[in-house]
């Protein structure tokens, strides 16, 4: 199978992915619940992902993190620092090392990680890892590159110094003064390493007593700008530009460049950047340029939210990150809008505003129906308890909209519902990133590390087959190079467009659009029913005259054939399409059609 022009990303946590231990004890240790290893991601696993239609694998949380598990070369962390026994993968303890949990021989963990990168390369899969620029674990200390440890040469007498790596608390800051106090079930607990010089918490909390809702296990990193005064600006607090020499930049910039260079030289080909909007844009312009000089095809995707008041720009942060050199940014607005359609009364017509097809970033966003921060789409506590099949229409819309990267989260393709409490986060409809665990629906696909789905139910096999077909279609020219034309606006007055009783406008549950690649002539009509339980009868989709001109159709009669798995087909001419619309018969709940136009 050829690698498509757009990345198809599979997000997996090594801890979960190959773990076949089914004990699943709440708050269980690594000995009780087991832990996936780098070696578990074997040739069979990688070949199966390739066959699914994956091009990139995001190895989530592989960097060494603060943890309750001790090793001969690494003691366990202070218990009150930890979220869960495994610890947060976003509280990084050594940026130049990988988590020893994931190695068969922890003393050779970097060798085992290099071997995984080599296997991925042989299978034509590109490796993405996390880059967490905003914060590190409070226990950060690099054993691999101790001379590059953060904070070792800081001037702790000032809240802000441009060449400090951290921001330091003073006697006048909130929280009762030193020592730093960590939130626990039994009340605030002093943290001995910060008895004199407390550090600002990762979520910008300037307080000696961060709360349980803060990122209390992390320390905020300093990029030569005082975040407390707002975004950088050249006239008051300028930062270096993209052409600045390494030695002329703030110390944190230099250390981060060394970190990225280290992983690039090891064979990592992409980075998913955590909370990228909390870092100055000037740094990204400089850093991505340096990374591209080392590897022109290195892939950068940003977790970023324009609505976050912590963003360090006065403009739209998604646009500014793309302008700084990012390949893609998260499309949280489209995801959230579709979730609200299913749960809280928004309409499918609202997708156009959220996705904003007229924006330059429309084709440069990463779209997903799940990731580790979001709830499982198959959870019966979320998504109107619609079950795992609601992932079909949701993904069909998000993946088909533009040309940007698309992502599946490990377990999504087998209907993982994240039932029950694993540990730190309770029963929150997410797969815990803080605890040792395995996935009840993924383990049958792993099937003793054969990765053949031998123990999946028939329904799970059908769901995984759907995602494979969808990814294959999204690798075709109409979806990798083509343009988008939304049809909901043209069908608002169309009574045969899924209108329910009492509604005076159409477009509540049905969403449709065209995709076309003019160079190849390939075109698709996508029609999706987002309703969890309602079948829409005698559906007609009107294609307005402007859309027909946009498609440059020269013939008069056209065939529409679904390529996503149903037997749906239809035939119509231009006059009928503009007038009564394309007749599609009945569209069941959660159904999706990718109709090739010939």
Image: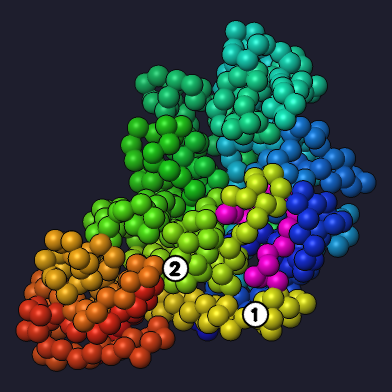
- Report the predominant secondary structure element of the magenta stretch: loop
Residue 520: quadrant of the picture: bottom left
Residue 293 visible to the viewer? no
Q: Give me the residue at 23% from left, 90% from top.
A: 570
- Label 1 crowd (10 A; few <14 / some 14-19 / many >=20): some
Relative horizontal placement of residue 141, taking residue 220 as reference (left or right)? right
Q: Give me the residue at 37% from left, 21% from top.
A: 235
| Quadrant of the rendering where the C terminus is positioned | bottom left
Q: Is residue 354 magenta?
A: no
**Disc with the residue nearer the chain's start (1 vs 2):** 2
Q: Nearer the viewer, residue 468 or 416?
A: 416
Tell me the SS state at disc 2. helix
| Residue under numbered circle 2 | 390
The span shown in magenta is 429-443
Image coordinates of residue 306 in percent, x first then y, are 39, 41
The label on residue 456 is 1
Task: Residue at the far right: name it.
Answer: 72
């Amino acid at each position: 199978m050829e690698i498509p022009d757009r990345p198809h990303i599979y997000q997996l946590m090594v801890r979960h992915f190959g773990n076949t231990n089914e004990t699943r004890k709440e708050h269980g240790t690594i000995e009780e619940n087991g832990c996936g290893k780098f070696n578990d991601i074997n040739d069979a696993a990688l070949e199966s992902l390739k066959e699914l239609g994956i091009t990139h694998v995001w190895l989530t949380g592989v960097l060494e993190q603060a943890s309750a598990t001790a090793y001969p070369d690494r003691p366990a962390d202070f218990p009150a620092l930890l979220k869960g026994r495994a610890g947060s993968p976003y509280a990084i303890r050594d940026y130049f090392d990988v988590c020893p949990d994931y190695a068969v021989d922890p003393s050779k963990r970097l060798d085992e990680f290099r071997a995984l990168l080599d296997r991925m390369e042989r299978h034509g899969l590109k490796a993405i890892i996390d880059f967490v620029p905003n914060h590190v674990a409070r226990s950060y200390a690099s054993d691999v590159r101790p001379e590059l440890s953060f904070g070792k040469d800081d001037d702790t007498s000032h809240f802000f110094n441009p060449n400090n790596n951290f921001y330091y608390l003073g006697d006048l800051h909130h929280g009762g003064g030193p020592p730093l106090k960590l939130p626990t079930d039994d009340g605030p607990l002093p943290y001995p390493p910060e008895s004199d010089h407390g550090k600002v918490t990762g979520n910008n909390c300037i307080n000696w007593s961060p709360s349980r809702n803060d990122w209390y296990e992390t320390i905020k990193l300093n990029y030569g700008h005082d975040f407390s005064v707002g975004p950088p600006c050249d006239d008051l607090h300028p930062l270096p530009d993209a052409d600045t020499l390494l030695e002329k930049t703030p110390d944190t910039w230099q250390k981060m460049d060394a970190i990225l260079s280290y992983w690039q030289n090891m064979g990592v080909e992409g980075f998913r950047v955590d909370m990228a909007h909390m870092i100055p844009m000037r740094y990204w312009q400089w850093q991505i340029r340096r990374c591209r000089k080392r590897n022109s095809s290195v892939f950068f995707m940003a977790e970023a939210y324009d609505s976050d008041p912590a963003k360090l720009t006065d403009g739209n942060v998604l646009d500014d990150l793309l302008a700084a050199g990012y390949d893609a940014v998260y499309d949280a607005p489209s995801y959230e809008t579709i979730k609200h359609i299913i749960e809280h009364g928004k309409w499918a017509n609202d997708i156009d505003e959220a996705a904003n097809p007229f924006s330059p970033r429309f084709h440069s966003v990463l779209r997903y129906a799940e990731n580790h921060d979001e709830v499982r789409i198959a959870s019966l506590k979320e998504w109107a308890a619609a079950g795992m099949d609601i992932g079909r229409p949701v993904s069909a819309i998000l993946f088909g909209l533009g040309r940007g990267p698309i992502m599946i989260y490990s377990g999504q393709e087998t209907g993982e519902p994240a039932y029950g409490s694993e540990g730190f986060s309770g029963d929150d409809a997410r797969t815990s990133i803080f605890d040792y665990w395995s996935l009840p629906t993924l383990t049958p696909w792993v099937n003793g590390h054969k990765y053949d789905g031998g123990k999946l139910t028939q329904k799970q096999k059908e769901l995984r087959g759907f995602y494979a077909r969808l990814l294959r279609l999204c690798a075709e020219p109409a979806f990798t190079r083509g343009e988008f034309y939304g049809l909901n606006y043209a069908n608002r007055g169309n009574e045969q467009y899924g209108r329910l009783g009492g509604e005076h406008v159409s477009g509540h549950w049905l969403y449709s659009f065209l995709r076309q690649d003019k160079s190849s002539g390939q075109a698709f009509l996508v029609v999706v029913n987002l309703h969890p339980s309602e079948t829409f009868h005698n559906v007609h989709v009107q294609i307005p005259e402007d859309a027909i001109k946009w498609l440059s159709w020269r013939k008069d009669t056209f065939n529409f054939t679904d390529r996503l798995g149903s037997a749906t087909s239809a035939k119509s001419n231009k006059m009928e399409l503009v007038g009564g619309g394309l007749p599609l018969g009945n569209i069941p709940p959660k159904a999706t059609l990718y109709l090739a136009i010939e």
